[in-house]
Amino acid sequence: MEYVLIRIAACLVGGLILSRLAKKANLPAVTAYLVAGLLLGPFCLGRVGIPGIGFSSLEQVETMKIITQVALGFIAFTIGNEFRLSQLKTMGKQAVTVGILQAVVTTVLVDVALIVLHFIAPQVISIPSAITLGAIAAATAPAATLMVVKQYKANGPMTKLLLMVVAIDDAVGLVLFSVSYGVASALEQGSLNWIGVVVEPLVEIVLSLALGTVAGFAMDRVEEYFYSRSKRLTISVAFVLLTVGLSSVEFHVGPVHCGFSLLLVCMMTGTVFCNVCDTSMELMDRVDGWTAPLNVLFFVLSGAELNLEVLSNPLVLLVGVVYIIFRSAGKISGSYISCAMTNCSETIKKHLGITLLPQAGVALGMALTATNLADGVMVRNVVLFSVLVYELVGPTLTKRSLMAAGEINPEGRTSARKQNVPGHHWLWSKHS
């Protein structure tokens, strides 16, 4: 236990120290946290073998999974807060169209590119693996995007649309992966499992949205009995932890395997709560403050999970480069086309696609499922390579796109140490 606590402290301090260096280099804090994770991981400091300092193996990082799951829950809950009825009335159609179309275009482009690669060099990748990677390419990581938005206080039409699109992307990606993986399995086994391809993904989405709806209403009702800000914050934290726990439950109804999507459950909880609770904005601000250290831990641990061994396999690098090029092309072109169809501004059409490039947890989960394919190890390693690239460069690209869109203002130089000092209130109000 003492070593676990020391590792957590090392992750927090290491991440924060590197974030200061990243600020001098004009890089997002998220990138610094990921690099700190790489340094503390099993391929750098972890190899030194000092107890408590760094992670000696990827399995040791896996033991901290509960922290990353909880952090993802709070991230999804925060994104759900963007689905307020006032915004849905003005941007709902755009968000749904962009969320679906950019994911489909990305999947098709990656599928075509990797299938062509298969015919050129059949020994490099199989068709089932190519089809599966195409579906995984649709997934976008909401965590890195949200952290960049929060760090730089980005605000504007593109930011609002972006947060809604990354939320919708999870549901679309789930359906695309289930269908593609079912087809890939059928090609290998010679039979198609319609329950796994059609029924189970729809059941997962419906159950996740239903559980999130119930949790959102229940959270609002329970909060009505408390007036203290600290107690209402405690209730909010408790309900997010509850939804994270419930979303891991799995069961069978006849031949149908039933489960929940953590991201969808927590997003729906946040969506319902923000629309039925009059004080949800104030509570969300307090939750953000409470979860700040948790978010640092999440990204440092994500960096520690990045497997550098995949860089030693030239075939993985070849497929990975093709995957990254065509996934990026799909996200950018798909966003541009769908934004044009929904009459978005020229600025949004030009810059939105780049902000959808980050990829992490959801894609890794899909890749883990894909290891059941005959060539599944290749799929997993390609996704690991792409996550390594996208997580390190994605936040910076997102920041630059939001700045180009005029939705990030120059950072104020307010010091937290001066906020409560008499005579400095004018400084805080000036830069807030």
Image (cartoon, rainbow, N blue to C red):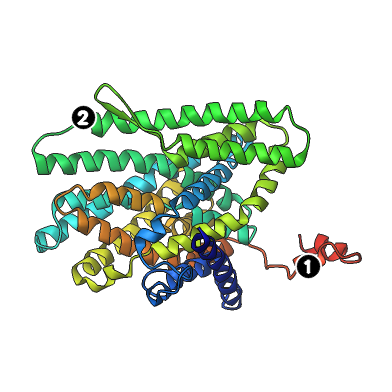
The mark tally for this picture is 2
Task: Give the residue type that dot 2 points to.
Answer: Trp
Q: Which residue is identified by label 1?
A: 417
Q: The residue under label 1 is which amino acid type? A: Arg
**Mark 1 nearby-residue class (10 Å; few <14, some 14–19, many ≥20):** few
Q: From the viewer's perspective, is residue 216 above or below residue 263?
A: above
Q: Residue 194 carries which label?
A: 2
Residue 11: image x %, image y %? 53, 65
Q: Is residue 182 left or right of residue 232?
A: left
Q: Where is residue 34 in the image (x, y as percent from the top left)?
A: 47, 66
Residue 84 location (% of width, % of height): 61, 36
Tell me the distance, in whole angstroms, between the alpha carbons under discs 1 and 2: 60 Å
Q: Residue at x 26, y 21 (%)?
A: 254
- The foreground one among 345 and 331 is 331
Foreground: 362 or 222?
222
Residue 129 badge: none
The residue furthest right is 423
> Residue placed at 22% from the left, 51% from the top?
371
Residue 237 occupies quadrant? top right
Please name the residue shown 44% across and 32% down the image: 208
- Is residue 148 shown left or right of residue 361? right
Q: Can residue 346 be seen in this view?
A: no
Q: Position of residue 193 (x, y in %)?
A: 18, 32
125 or 13: nearer the viewer: 13
Q: Closer to the N terminus: mark 1 or mark 2?
A: 2
Secondary element at image label 1: helix
